[in-house]
Image (cartoon, rainbow, N blue to C red):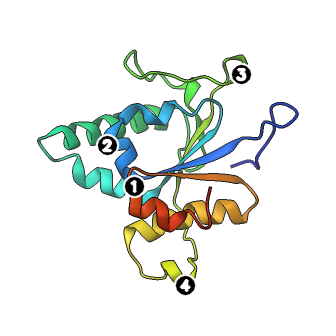
């Protein structure tokens, strides 16, 4: 993925790292961050894959996110990043375009990330937070987005 760029004098691209629960709550959340980057940790994809088999609202939401990712995958490599505006995402999703109708990139992060001592335990939540921490360490404006208050509070000291 290319380094953060600017659109105007002070408007820098942000990297929104999404937790699984955000996508399960709103499968169209991929498309609401205007012209900013949406980063999906590989751990989130694995969790969605497990949940898509459920026969309830969570399973339906997981399947919808997987369908969105499949449409994006047909446009380009999700590990490199795909401008979601180039994908036929259907009439359902509410789109949130940036200035001049621009869209951001959606990328699945498959890299291994070192974690600080506080997050050393190898569990899914810690691997997800580590993605945002590494982006911030690279000098990017990383924002971790989660509906899990305890998870978000663990990430807060280090990530916006």
- Cα separation, mark 1 vs mark 3, equals 29 Å
Element carrying mark 3: helix
- Residue 74 seen by the camera: no
Residue assigned mark 1: 44
Percent position (x, y) of residue 110? 52, 60
Q: Is residue 97 above or below residue 12?
A: above
Disc 4 and disc 2 in contact, CB within 8 angstroms: no
Q: State which mark lies toward you, 1 or 2.
A: 2
Residue assigned mark 4: 117
Disc 2 and disc 3 in contact, CB within 8 angstroms: no
- Cα separation, mark 4 vs mark 2, equals 29 Å
Quadrant of res 28:
top left
Residue projecting furthest to the left: 55
Q: What residue is rendered at 35% in x and 38% in y? A: 65
Quadrant of res 23:
top left
Give left or right: position of 78 versus 121: right
Element carrying mark 1: helix
Percent position (x, y) of residue 92? 37, 19
Q: What residue is rendered at 31% in x and 43% in y? A: 24
In the rendering, which numbered label is found on residue 24?
2
Element carrying mark 4: helix
- Cα separation, mark 1 vs mark 2, equals 10 Å
Q: What residue is rendered at 49% in x and 82% in y? A: 120
């Amino acid at each position: 993925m290319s380094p953060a760029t600017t659109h105007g004098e002070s408007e820098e691209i942000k990297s929104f790292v999404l937790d699984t629960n955000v996508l399960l709550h709103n499968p169209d959340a991929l498309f609401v961050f205007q012209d900013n980057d949406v980063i999906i940790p590989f751990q989130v994809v694995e969790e969605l894959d497990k949940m898509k088999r459920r026969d309830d609202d969570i399973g339906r939401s997981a399947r919808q996110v997987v369908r969105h990712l499949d449409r994006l995958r047909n446009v380009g490599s999700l590990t490199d990043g795909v401008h979601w505006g180039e994908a036929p995402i259907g009439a359902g999703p509410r789109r949130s375009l940036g200035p001049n109708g621009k869209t951001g990139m959606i990328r699945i992060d498959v890299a291994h990330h070192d974690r600080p001592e506080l997050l050393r335990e190898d569990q899914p939540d810690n691997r997800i937070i580590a993605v945002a921490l590494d982006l911030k360490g690279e000098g990017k404006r990383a924002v971790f987005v989660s509906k899990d208050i305890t998870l978000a509070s663990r990430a807060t000291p280090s990530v916006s």
